[in-house]
Amino acid sequence: MIRALVFDFDGLILDTETPLQRSWEEIYAAFGLTVSPAKWASLLGAAADPPEAYALLEEHLGHPIDRPAMRERHLKREQELLAAETILPGVRELIAEARSRGLRLAVASSSDRAWVERHLRTFDLMACFDVLLCAEDVAFTKPDPELYNAALHALDARSNEAIAFEDSAHGAEAAHRAGLFTVVVPNRATRHAAFPCADLVVDSIAERSLGEYIAAAERRERRSRG
């Protein structure tokens, strides 16, 4: 039944979200602001550079900030921290197993294409995916289901023939609204969030085999058919 896998990118294939969080935490600390892990986790998944991060600082200060300058500041630090990151455990193995079974693979990301492609090429993963859909390809990013609906169309798959892998609540909501069986793999930044739209939550993609993910998706489909 399962013919395709759809992967988020940020925080799922490569943990770009923890460096993002840490870069902002350092900025907030300089201005005497503390943001709870749960609040920060709620911002992730809809954009690579969440505008809410700037708004939180402006609300704390009581006046607008120079957003372009602040963006340059946090991006510089984020890139320094990101240099220490590598592909998350189990991702390469799952991709290899899926391709050996003849499944089609897609990335559906709310980030810009240049950002996603650069990192996929850095880790020699670009050629692994049949479809790459990013923020430029849709009118609305996650939690809207448009990215996932577009991925299903490009993969020529129905929603019950694909599994989504996500790390954030926004991403899980998008996949769920598109009808995919949704696996959430929280990272260090998103683990404080709740995932009401997830069908399955695991600590690592490596926690289960592809066969086990497929079996879980098939069980849901059987239940839905009564």
Image: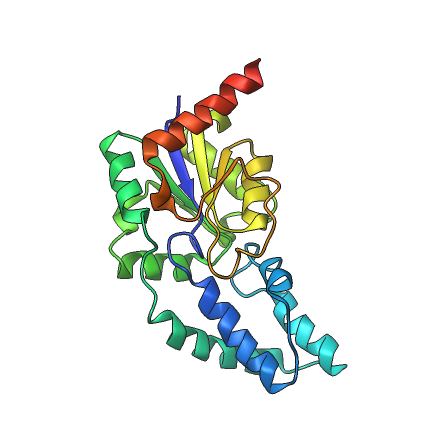
Q: How is the image coloured?
A: rainbow
Task: Give the percent coordinates (x, y) of residue 143.
Answer: 60, 47
Task: Give the percent coordinates (x, y) of residue 134.
Answer: 46, 51
Is 104 above or below relative to 77? above
Whether residue 142 is visible: no
Is 72 above or below relative to 91? below
Is residue 16 found left or right of 31 in the rendered image? left
Say which residue appears at 25% left-offset and 40% top-offset.
Answer: 96
Task: Give the percent coordinates (x, y) of residue 114.
Answer: 40, 61
Whether residue 40 is visible: yes
Task: Please state which of residues 52 and 186 is positioned toward the viewer in this rendering.
Answer: 186
Q: Quadrant of the N terminus?
A: top left
Task: Give the percent coordinates (x, y) of residue 112.
Answer: 46, 59
Is residue 83 found left or right of 31 in the rendered image? left
Say which residue appears at 64% left-offset and 85% top-offset.
Answer: 31
Outermost residue to the right:
62
Say which residue appears at 46% left-offset and 33% top-offset.
Answer: 152
Task: Please state which of residues 221 and 47 is positioned toward the viewer in this rendering.
Answer: 221
Q: Quadrant of the C terminus?
A: top right
